[in-house]
Image: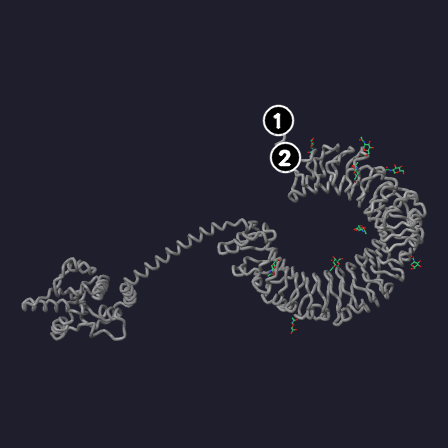
C-alpha cells in the first residue's frame, strides 16, 4: 500500500465517522448506535465521557480496539456481536463507571479483563451467556450495581470479595437458571450491607434451604414468578423465615402460567418474614379462600394487583400507611373492612375489573389520599355517603367512573381537599349549584369530559386557591364562560378544549393575571382577540388549534404576551389572502414559538387545501399592492382630469341637461319675446340707446329679451339664458364686438343659441357686427367664424343712410317667419 492509498483511507474513515456518529453534547456525549462499525471512529474526541456504541460489529475486544479515552465514564457495547474479551481490553478506558455489555454472545471472558476498571459502579452483563457469578472482580471496590439477568447462572453464590463492596446495592439475577438456594450460597449476602436489592424473579426455584435467608437484611427482594410450582412457593416462603426485608415483591407477572392453588395456607410463610412493604401480584383464583392479608397485618405498605379477590377480609392492620388494591374483582368498596384504620394515609382502589358498588369510609383521621378511579362506580349524594371522619383528605380521584352526584353541602367535611379529579365521570349538579364553594384549599380540579353544562356562573364560587382547572369536553350555556372564571385569580392553567365554544368575550379571562397555560383547542372560535388583554401577559402556552380562526389582527399580534413560547394555531382555516400579509408574515417569522407550524394550512383557496401558510409568497402580494397603487393613481388622475373638464365645460354640460329637458316638451313653449339679444355689457349703452329704442318703439313694436331687464330674479343665469332667452324668444340677435369676443358669457350664450338652432335647422340667429373684429379673433368663438362666412350679417354704421337701411333690414329679419 503506497502513501496515497494510506492517506486516502484515513480521510475516508474520518469523513465516514463524522457522518456515522451523532454528537449529542459537543465533546462529551456521542452516539454511534446501529452503524455496523467495527472500530471506534477517530472523530470521537478524547474528551468524550459517554459513548453509546451499541448495535455495532466489534466481535473481538482487545486493548487496541479502544483509543486512550481517559475521561470516558459510560460505555455501552450492547449487541456488538462480541465473542471474545481479552484481559487487557479496557486498559485504555480505565475510568469507566458504567460498562454495558448486554446481548453479546461472549464465549471467552478474559479472567482479568475487569481488573483495570477500579472505578466501575455499574456493570451490566445481561444476556451474555454467563454461567456463574464467579468473575474476577477484585478491583471493583466501588461497584454499586451488578446486573446479570438472562444468563445461565445456577447459583446465587457471590465471590467472597464482594462482601467488602460498601456501595453495592443491587444484584439483578432475573431469568437465570437458579433452582436451588442453599445456606452456604448466601454467606456473602449475609455479610453485605442492609441496602441491597436482590432480584430473583423468573428463576425456576424449586427449593430453598430453610433458614438460608435467616438474619439477612435486604432493602428489597423480588421473587415474582420465581417458583416452579405452588408447592415450591409455599415451601419457599416458609424457608425464608428470619429474613428482614423492607420491600417484598412476590406473586406472578401478568401473562405467566398460573398455579393451581390447593391450600388455604399458601401464604402462611409470610408470617415469619419481617417486611414493611409487600407487593403481591396474583393472577390466579385460589380454589380455597386464601387469607391474603393475614400475614400482612404489620406492613406499612400493601399492594395487591391483578388479584381475583372479590371480597376483602377484615384485617386490623396495625401500622398500615398505604394500601393499593388494583385491578381486582371487588364487588363493593371495602368501606367496612377499612374503616377505623387510624394509620392509613393513602388508599388506592382502582381499575377494578367489575363495576364496583360504593361503600362508606368512616373514621380515618389520617387519610389524605383517596384514589377510586376507573371503577365504573355510580355514587349518589357525594360525598357524605362515601366519606365521614376523614378531615385530612387532600387528594380525591374519582375519575373514569360512571356517575357522581354532589349534593349541596356534600363536601362540607372535606374542606382540606387540594386535588380533585372527576374527569370522564358524569358529574351531576356541578353546573347548577356552587357545590364546591367550601373547598378553599383546592388547587387542582379536573372535570374534563364530565357531561357538565355550566349554567350557573357561580359554579366555581369560592375556589380562591385554584391553580389548575380542566373543564375540557363540557359546555357553557349562553355567556356563562364570560363570568365563570372571573374570581379564580391564582389560576395558572386552564383547559377548556373541546367545549364547542363559538366566541370568548375578552373579559372571560379578566383577573387571571397568573394564567400561564390556556387550552382552547377544538372549539369553534373564529377570533382570539382576548389575547390582547393585558391580564394575560404571563401566558406562555396557548393551544388554539382545531378552531375556525381565519386570521389574527395586527393589533392583537402586537399585544401578544411577551413570554408566549408555545402557540398552537394548526388546523385552523387560515385566510392567506393579501389583506392578511401582516398575519402570514407573523406566522413565517414566529415559527419558533408556533407548535407544528407545518400544519398551519391556508384554507382560502379550498377547504381541503394543504397549502402551508409558511409557504405563502408574501412578495406576490407586494407586487399586487404596487399594481393596486398604480391603478389607483391612474384612477385619481382620470377623475381629476374629468373634474377639470367638467369644470371647464360646465356650461355646455348644464346646457345639454337643460336642452334635453327642454326638448322633451318641444313646441309647448310659447315664445314670449321676438328676439333675445346676446351682447357684452360693455355694449349695453348701444343696446339700450340704439337697439332697444329703434326696435321696441318702432311699428310694429318688437319685444326684445334683455338679460338685465327680463331675466327672472332667483333663477340661475344659465336657466334664464335657456328658458327666457333662447327658448323663450323666436330669434337671437348677436351683437358682435371686441368685448363680445372677450366675454366668456357671451361666447357661451352664442354657442348655446347656435346649438339650439342647429338642432332645429333654422338660421334664426341674426348677427350684428357692432365693430370690426379681426378675422382671427372670430375663430375664438366657436362657430362664429363659420357662421359669418355662411350667412349674411348686419353691420352697424354711424352713417345715417346706411343706418336707416340697417334698421329696416334688421326689422325684416326679426319679423320674418320662422321656418
Ligand atoms: C456490516 O459491515 C460488514 C463489514 O464490516 C459487512 O460485511 C456487512 O454486510 C454489514 N452489514 C450491514 C447490515 O450493513
Ligand atoms: C489474564 O489475567 C489473569 C489475572 O488478572 C491472569 O491470571 C491470566 O493469566 C491472564 N490471562 C492472559 C491470557 O493474559
Ligand atoms: C487494581 O487496582 C489497583 C489500585 O486500585 C491497581 O494498582 C492495580 O493495578 C489494579 N489491577 C489491575 C490488574 O489493573
Ligand atoms: C438449568 O440447570 C439445570 C441443572 O440445574 C440444567 O439441567 C438445565 O439444562 C439448565 N437449563 C438451561 C436452559 O441451561
Ligand atoms: C440504598 O440504595 C439506593 C438505591 O437502591 C441508593 O439510592 C441509596 O443511596 C442507598 N443508600 C445507602 C445508605 O447506601
Ligand atoms: C405483628 O407484630 C406483632 C408485634 O409487633 C407480632 O406479635 C405479630 O406476630 C406480628 N404479626 C405478623 C403476622 O407478623
Ligand atoms: C386520577 O386517576 C387517573 C386514573 O388512574 C389518573 O390518570 C390521573 O392522573 C389521576 N389524577 C390525578 C390528579 O392524579
Ligand atoms: C367574585 O367575587 C366577588 C367578591 O367576592 C363576588 O361579589 C362575586 O359574586 C364573585 N363572582 C363570581 C362569579 O364568583
Ligand atoms: C417573562 O419571563 C422572564 C424570564 O423567565 C421573567 O423574568 C418575566 O417576568 C416574564 N414576564 C412576564 C410578563 O411574566
Q: How many numbered marks, from 0 up?
A: 2
Q: Nearer the viewer, residue 190 or 509?
A: 190
Residue 128 appears left or right of 244: left
Quarter of the picture holding the N terminus: top right
Q: Quadrant of residue 411?
A: bottom right
Q: Is residue 124 above or below residue 323?
A: above
**Residue 344 occupies quadrant:** bottom right
- From what the image shows, is residue 224 above or below residue 515? above
Give the class, few, some or many, for how many residues have Cα within 10 Å of label 2's Cα (few <14, many ≥20).
few
**Of residues 372 and 119, which is closer to you in this image?**
119
Considering the numbered disc 1 on the image, is that residue within a helix, a strand or a loop? helix
Q: Position of residue 615 (x, y in %)?
A: 54, 48
Q: Is residue 701 visible?
A: yes
**Distance between the alpha carbons at the discs numbered 1 and 2:** 16 Å
Res 5 label: 1
Instruction: From the viewer's perspective, tell me whether residue 607 is left or right of residue 366.
Output: left
Residue 653's disc number: none
Residue extending furthest toward the top: 1
Residue under label 2, please give it. Answer: 16
Q: Quadrant of the C terminus?
A: bottom left
Q: Position of residue 38 (x, y in %)?
A: 70, 33
SS for tag 2?
helix
Image: 412 above or below 562: below
Q: Mark 1 or mark 2: name the one nearer the start of the chain.
A: 1
State left or right for residue 416 relative to residue 273: left
Q: x, y percentage for residue 678?
A: 19, 68
Q: Which residue sits at x=57%, y=55%? A: 573
Are there few (<14), some (14-19), or many (20+) residues within 10 Å of tag 1? few
Which is more toward the observer, 754 or 265? 265
| Location of ligand 7 given as a quarter of the image | bottom right
Amino acid at each position: 500500500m503506497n502513501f496515497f492509498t494510506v492517506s486516502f483511507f484515513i480521510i475516508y474513515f474520518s469523513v465516514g465517522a463524522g457522518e456515522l456518529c451523532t454528537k449529542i453534547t459537543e465533546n462529551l456525549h456521542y452516539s454511534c448506535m446501529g452503524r455496523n462499525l467495527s472500530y471506534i471512529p477517530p472523530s470521537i474526541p478524547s474528551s468524550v465521557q459517554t459513548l453509546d456504541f451499541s448495535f455495532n460489529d466489534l466481535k473481538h475486544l482487545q486493548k487496541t480496539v479502544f483509543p486512550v479515552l481517559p475521561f470516558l465514564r459510560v460505555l455501552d457495547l450492547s449487541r456488538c456481536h462480541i465473542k471474545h474479551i481479552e484481559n487487557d481490553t479496557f486498559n485504555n478506558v480505565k475510568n469507566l463507571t458504567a460498562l454495558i455489555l448486554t446481548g453479546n454472545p461472549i464465549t471467552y471472558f478474559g479472567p482479568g479483563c475487569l481488573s483495570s476498571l477500579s472505578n466501575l459502579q455499574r456493570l451490566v452483563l445481561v444476556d451474555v451467556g454467563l454461567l456463574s457469578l464467579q468473575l474476577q472482580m477484585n478491583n471493583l471496590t466501588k461497584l454499586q450495581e451488578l446486573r446479570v439477568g438472562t444468563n445461565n447462572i445456577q447459583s446465587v453464590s457471590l465471590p467472597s470479595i464482594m462482601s467488602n463492596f460498601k456501595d453495592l446495592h443491587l444484584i439483578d439475577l432475573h431469568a437465570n437458571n437458579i433452582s436451588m438456594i442453599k445456606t452456604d450460597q448466601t454467606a456473602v449476602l449475609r455479610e453485605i450491607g442492609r441496602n441491597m436489592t436482590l432480584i430473583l424473579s423468573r428463576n425456576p426455584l424449586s427449593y430453598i434451604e430453610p433458614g438460608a435467608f435467616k438474619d439477612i437484611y435486604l432493602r428489597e427482594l423480588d421473587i415474582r414468578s420465581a417458583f416452579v410450582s405452588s408447592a415450591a412457593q409455599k415451601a419457599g416462603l416458609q424457608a425464608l423465615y428470619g429474613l428482614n426485608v423492607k420491600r417484598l415483591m412476590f406473586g406472578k407477572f401478568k401473562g405467566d402460567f398460573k398455579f393451581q392453588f390447593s391450600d388455604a395456607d399458601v401464604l402462611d410463610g409470610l408470617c415469619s418474614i419481617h417486611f414493611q412493604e409487600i407487593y403481591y401480584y396474583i393472577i390466579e383464583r385460589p380454589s380455597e379462600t386464601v387469607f391474603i392479608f393475614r400475614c400482612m397485618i404489620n406492613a406499612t405498605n400493601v399492594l395487591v394487583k391483578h388479584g381475583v379477590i372479590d371480597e376483602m377480609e377484615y384485617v386490623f392492620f396495625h401500622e398500615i400507611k398505604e394500601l393499593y388494591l388494583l385491578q381486582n374483582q371487588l364487588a363493593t368498596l371495602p368501606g367496612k373492612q377499612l374503616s377505623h384504620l387510624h394509620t392509613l394515609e393513602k388508599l388506592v382502589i382502582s381499575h377494578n375489573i367489575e363495576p364496583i358498588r360504593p361503600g362508606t369510609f368512616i373514621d380515618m383521621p389520617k387519610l389524605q389520599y383517596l384514589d377510586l378511579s376507573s371503577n365504573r362506580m355510580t355514587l349518589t349524594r357525594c360525598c357524605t355517603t362515601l366519606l365521614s371522619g376523614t378531615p385530612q383528605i387532600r387528594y380525591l380521584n374519582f375519575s373514569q367512573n360512571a356517575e357522581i352526584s354532589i349534593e349541596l353541602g356534600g363536601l362540607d367535611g372535606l374542606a382540606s381537599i387540594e386535588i380533585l379529579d372527576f374527569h370522564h365521570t358524569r358529574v351531576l349538579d356541578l353546573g347548577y349549584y356552587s357545590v364546591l364553594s367550601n373547598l378553599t384549599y383546592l388547587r387542582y380540579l379536573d372535570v374534563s369530559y364530565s357531561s357538565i353544562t355550566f349554567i350557573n356562573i357561580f359554579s366555581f364560587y369560592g375556589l380562591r386557591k385554584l391553580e389548575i382547572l380542566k373543564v375540557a369536553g363540557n359546555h357553557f350555556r349562553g355567556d356563562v364562560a364570560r363570568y365563570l372564571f372571573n374570581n379564580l385569580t391564582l389560576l395558572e392553567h386552564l383547559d377548556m378544549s373541546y367545549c364547542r365554544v363559538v366566541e370568548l368575550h375578552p373579559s372571560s379571562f379578566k383577573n387571571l393575571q397568573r394564567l400561564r397555560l390556556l387550552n382552547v383547542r377544538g372549539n369553534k372560535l373564529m377570533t382570539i382577540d382576548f389575547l390582547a388583554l393585558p391580564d394575560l401577559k404571563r401566558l406562555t402556552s396557548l393551544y388554539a388549534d382545531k378552531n375556525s380562526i381565519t386570521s389574527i389582527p395586527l393589533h392583537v399580534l402586537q399585544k401578544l404576551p411577551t413570554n408566549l413560547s408555545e402557540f398552537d394555531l394548526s388546523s385552523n382555516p387560515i385566510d392567506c389572502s393579501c389583506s392578511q400579509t401582516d398575519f402570514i408574515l407573523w406566522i413565517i417569522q414566529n415559527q419558533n414559538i408556533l407548535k407544528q407550524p407545518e400544519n398551519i394550512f391556508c384554507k382560502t383557496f379550498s377547504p381541503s387545501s394543504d397549502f402551508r401558510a409558511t409557504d405563502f409568497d408574501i412578495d406576490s402580494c407586494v407586487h399586487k399592492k404596487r399594481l393596486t397603487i398604480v391603478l389607483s393613481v391612474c384612477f385619481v388622475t382620470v377623475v381629476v382630469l374629468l373634474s377639470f373638464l367638467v369644470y371647464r365645460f360646465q356650461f355646455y354640460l348644464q346646457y345639454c341637461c337643460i336642452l334635453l329637458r327642454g326638448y322633451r316638451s318641444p313646441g309647448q313653449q310659447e315664445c314670449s319675446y321676438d328676439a333675445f339679444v346676446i351682447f357684452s355689457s360693455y355694449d349695453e349703452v348701444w343696446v339700450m340707446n340704439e337697439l332697444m329704442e329703434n326696435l321696441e318703439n318702432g311699428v310694429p313694436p318688437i319685444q326684445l329679451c334683455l338679460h338685465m331687464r327680463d331675466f327672472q330674479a332667483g333663477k340661475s343665469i344659465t336657466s334664464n339664458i335657456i328658458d327666457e332667452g333662447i327658448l323663450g324668444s323666436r330669434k337671437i340677435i348677436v351683437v358682435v364686438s371686441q368685448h363680445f369676443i372677450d366675454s366668456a358669457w357671451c361666447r357661451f350664450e352664442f354657442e348655446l343659441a347656435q346649438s339650439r338652432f342647429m338642432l332645429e335647422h333654422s338660421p334664426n340667429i341674426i348677427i350684428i357686427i357692432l365693430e370690426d373684429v379681426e378675422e382671427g379673433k372670430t375663430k375664438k368663438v366657436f362657430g362664429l367664424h363659420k357662421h359669418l362666412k355662411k350667412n349674411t350679417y348686419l353691420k352697424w354704421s354711424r352713417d345715417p343712410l346706411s343706418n336707416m337701411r340697417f334698421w329696416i333690414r334688421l326689422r325684416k329679419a326679426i319679423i320674418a317667419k320662422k321656418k
